[in-house]
Amino acid sequence: MRNTTKLKAVLQYYHIDLSMNDQELMVLNLFHKQTGEVMTFEDASYSKLISKAYSYMNKQLKETTKNI
């Protein structure tokens, strides 16, 4: 799956903040649009960050559907 496809899926549920820290690692903050829950990922690779965010989103969606 392409990064743009993953990013589009993540953006349906989360606001994203992308920045870089002092160690030159990219930092991706996810803010859930409805609950306000925040999750942070760090990595040197943009592709890995998007993959982590996408995996996290899928995990959260599965847990939400289990609880219903």
Image (cartoon, rainbow, N blue to C red):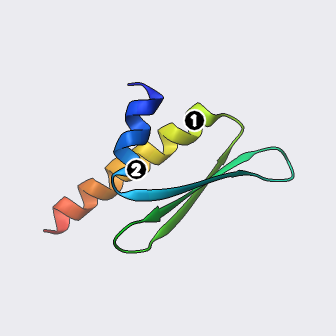
Residue 25 sits in quarter: top right
Tell me if 2 is positioned left or right of 29 in this view: left
Q: Are marks 2 and 1 in contact (CB under 8 Å)?
A: no
Residue displayed at 57% across by 35% down: 48
Residue type marked 2: Leu
Q: CA distance from mark 2 to mark 1?
A: 16 Å
The residue at 53%/62% (across/down) is 39
Q: Earlier in the sequence, mark 2 or mark 1?
A: 2
Up-down relation of residue 17 to residue 4 (above or below): below
Figure quadrant of the N terminus: top left
Up the image or down, 41 lies above or below 3; here it is below
Classify 10 Å Cα crowding around label 1: few (below 14), some (14-19), many (20 and above): some
**Is residue 59 toward the left or the right of residue 49 in the image?**
left
Residue in the foreground of this view, choosing between 53 and 11 = 11
Whole-percent x and y of residue 68?
13, 68
Q: In the picture shown, does residue 5 fall above or below 43?
A: above
Label 2 belongs to which residue?
11
Is 11 in front, or is 66?
Answer: 11
On the image, the x and y values in percent for residue 11 come to 40, 50
31 sits left or right of 17 in the view: left
Rate crowding at label 2 as few (under 14), some (14 to 19) or many (20 or more) other CA atoms within 10 Å.
some
- Which residue shows up at 27% across the image and 60% down it? 63
List the residue tagged with mark 1: 48
Q: Residue furthest bottom?
A: 35
- In this view, 65 is above or below 58: below
Question: In the picture, residue 6 is in which quadrant?
Answer: top left
Q: Position of residue 20 (x, y in %)?
A: 76, 49
